[in-house]
């Protein structure tokens, strides 16, 4: 005996809600390790802004915002 189509639809709906809630929880993670310090074109532009000497892994040039403009991300 197969379950009615409404059971199948209800199960799919519940699964999609669980997945959606999990993705919202991941996106709302505000534990950002970056301290943003102004615009950049390449990673080397960020060493001085972050107060670091080259070569350092504590400075990144990352896309940010709606326009994806690149900004310095200083990892502290």
Image: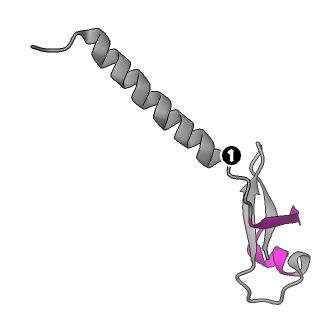
Instruction: Look at 78% across and 89% down and name the residue there.
Output: 54
26 w.r.t. 14: above or below: below
Q: Tell me the colour scheme of the image.
A: one colour
Q: Residue 9 vs residue 21: left or right? A: left
Q: Report the quarter where the N terminus lies.
A: top left
Q: Residues within 10 Å of mark 1 (few under 14, many from 20)?
A: few
Looking at the rendered structure, the secondary structure element under dot 1 is loop
The image shows residue 66, relative to residue 62, as above or below, that is above
Q: Residue at x 83, y 66 (%)?
A: 35
Residue 23 seen in the current view: yes
Q: Position of residue 24 (x, y in %)?
A: 61, 39
Position of 22 compared to 46: left or right?
left
Which quarter of the figure has residue 55? bottom right
Can residue 11 be found in the magenta stretch?
no
Residue matched to label 1: 28
What x and y, as percent, mark residue 26?
Answer: 60, 48
Q: Give how far across and how far down residue 59 sits, in percent.
A: 77, 76
Magenta segment range? 33-47
Snapshot quadrant of residue 8: top left
Q: Nearer the viewer, residue 53 or 18?
A: 18
Above or below, 36 against 45 in this view is above
- Quadrant of the rendered structure where residue 2 is? top left
Q: Position of residue 76 (x, y in %)?
A: 79, 76
Question: Is residue 42 a member of the stretch shown in magenta?
Answer: yes
């Amino acid at each position: 005996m197969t379950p009615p189509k409404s059971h199948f639809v209800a199960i799919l709906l519940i699964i999609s809600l669980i997945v959606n809630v999990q993705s919202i929880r991941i996106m709302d993670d505000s534990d950002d390790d970056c301290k943003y310090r102004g615009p950049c074109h390449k990673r080397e532009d960020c060493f001085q802004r972050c107060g670091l000497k080259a070569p350092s892994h504590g400075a990144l040039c990352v896309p940010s915002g709606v326009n994806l403009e690149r900004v310095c991300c200083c990892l502290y």
